[in-house]
Image (spheres, grey):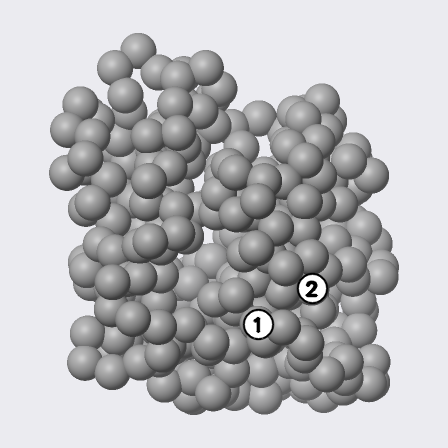
Amino acid sequence: MSITKEASVMTDGCGRTIDYLRLSVTDLCNYRCRYCMSPEGIAKRDHREMLSIEELAEIGSAAVQCGVKKIRLTGGEPLVRRGLLELCRLLRAIPALEELCLTTNGALLPQMARPLREAGVDRLNISLDTLRPERFAAMTRLGRLEDVSAGISAAEEAGFSHLKLDTVLIGGFNDDEIGDFLNLTREHPWEVRFIELMPMGPCAAWEKSCFLAAETVLERHPTLQEIESQGVARRYRLPGAAGTVGLISPMSHDFCGQCRRIRVTADGRLKGCLHSAEELPLRGLHGDALEAAIRRGILQKPRRHHLDSRPSDTPRTMNQIGG
């Protein structure tokens, strides 16, 4: 797959430069995290309802033509998707794509880390909400902390550097582990990123005490020193630490003005905002028609979400959108 036209720069209706696509490859997952999915998981859809590897690559290529420089593969759990490595190779072959990333729960990285690196993936984010095995099993319902630990080791051995560990901050569940997560950055060149829990899917009805502001991290650990921000993450470092700390605050800090991303679901619908009900179908479109639809979706990207006044407007759960 190649691009012959010069890729453009695309701004939305609010003047934001949009250069980041989160491309979901599946809504399936090998976990059943309590804030994301019901205990029974989701009904498996016919594979014909989902984008093929070729369609995913075509959308990625068209998005790059529209100004996207970075693609992140998401799910569900992207590593359960058949053909994922082939997709990575196809995307990496796009000349104007600057960065290919992937978010994973890490359980399958012992087998997949090296092939992912060889297929052209540049960076990994690994979801990790607790460092305690019993809590991990309770939250994921199906996972084992030891598998993720092995996955992190495998990722580093495969050549992935500066890993990012994504931790959803949940009051009454893992807020007593903030110090433990910070200590990981003392010895490891990782970025631990605390992400505020958002009221969508199963957790929308949870008690308010579960929804902690990321500022809690700073209040409890005032020795954190602010460094340069990166995207929507405010970043900090403990004195002398090898790694960094990121705070992502979709609830307490309105960062919508800096949002530069669009999303495409595994069934081929473009979402300008994670929390919007608006979706634009891309499946079946090709060439100029596909690019035109992506540009239209970018132009229609909402100014902001409304989580400060109501739960998410999207009818989908996070795994159905792309985490």
Q: Nearer the viewer, residue 129 or 164?
A: 129
- State the separation of the CA atoms marked 2 and 1: 9 Å
Could you classify mark 1 by the number of other residues whose Cα lies within 10 Å: few (under 14), some (14-19), or many (20 or more)? many
Callouts 2 and 1 close, C-beta under 8 Å? yes
Query: Which quadrant would residue 117 be assigned to in this image?
Result: top right
Q: Position of residue 68 (x, y in %)?
A: 50, 59
Q: How many marks?
A: 2
Would you name the residue on which mark 2 appears?
Answer: 29
Residue positioned 48% across, 43% down in the render: 130
Q: Give the numbered dot on residue 313.
A: none
Residue positioned 20% across, 45% down in the render: 216
Q: Is residue 277 left or right of residue 94?
A: left
On the question of residue 71 being in view, the answer is: no
Give the secondary structure at mark 1.
loop
Q: Viewer-nearest of labels 2 and 1?
A: 1
Q: In the rendered view, tell whether residue 288 sits above or below residue 88.
A: below
Q: Give the numbered dot on residue 37.
A: 1
